[in-house]
Image: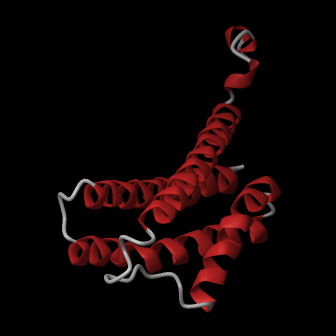
């Protein structure tokens, strides 16, 4: 039981928060670029700084979910991990400074979709963390908790 709590609290939760925060930051940078608050070079360099760590974190989270037997989380993470792998193999994962305005709308839509997926994964993680914590602390026998579910 302790390993399951460790998995959700120490591995999944911080990784999901980091992925969500980096994607949210990238969306903000793209909106600033669209509103002309930032120049294309700064925007692309700031976004490209977070691309590889995001890909690595997403891939590691997917592999850890596979090896620990958390199949639902693995199936939630597989599509975005495969998409990241496809972008990396095709060498299309970085934003080009000269073409940033041409792909701005597509990049915003992609990152908003990733943000929604990471939010769903975070909600599932918090739900599972709460269930494991309640079970681990032995609070499931309390009559008051019966009415919460």
Judge from the rendering whether residue 58 lies leftward or rightward of residue 41; answer left or right: right
Q: Is residue 38 above or below residue 122?
A: below
Residue at the far front: name it.
Answer: 102
x then y, percent, for residue 111: 50, 59
* Quarter of image, res 142: top right
Q: Is residue 143 above or below residue 100?
A: above
Residue at horizontal 58 percent and vertical 69 percent from the top: 58
- Quadrant in which the C terminus is drawn: top right
- Count of labels in the image: 0
* Quarter of image, res 87: bottom right
Q: Nearer the viewer, residue 5 or 45?
A: 45
x then y, percent, for residue 135: 71, 34
x then y, percent, for residue 10: 52, 57
Q: Nearer the viewer, residue 21 or 15?
A: 21
* Quarter of image, res 90: bottom right
Q: Is residue 115 above or below residue 33?
A: above
Judge from the rendering whether residue 24 lies leftward or rightward of residue 73; answer left or right: left
Residue at horizontal 25 percent and vertical 53 percent from the top: 35
x then y, percent, for residue 88: 58, 86
Judge from the rendering whether residue 140 lies leftward or rightward of residue 12; answer left or right: right
Applied colour scheme: secondary structure
Residue at horizontal 32 percent and vertical 83 percent from the top: 98
Q: Nearer the viewer, residue 68 or 137?
A: 68
Residue at horizontal 40 percent and vertical 61 percent from the top: 22
């Amino acid at each position: 039981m302790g390993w399951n709590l460790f998995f959700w609290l120490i591995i999944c939760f911080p990784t999901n928060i980091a992925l969500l925060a980096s994607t949210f930051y990238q969306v903000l940078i793209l909106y600033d670029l669209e509103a002309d608050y930032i120049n294309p070079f700064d925007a692309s360099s700031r976004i490209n700084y977070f691309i590889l760590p995001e890909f690595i974190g997403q891939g590691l989270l997917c592999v850890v979910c596979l090896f620990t037997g958390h199949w639902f989380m693995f199936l939630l993470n597989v599509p975005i991990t495969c998409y990241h792998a496809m972008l990396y193999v095709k060498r299309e994962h970085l934003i080009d400074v000269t073409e940033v305005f041409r792909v701005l709308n597509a990049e915003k839509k992609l990152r908003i979709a990733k943000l929604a997926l990471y939010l769903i994964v975070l909600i599932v993680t918090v739900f599972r963390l709460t269930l494991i914590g309640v079970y681990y602390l032995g609070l499931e026998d309390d009559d008051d908790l019966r009415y919460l579910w």
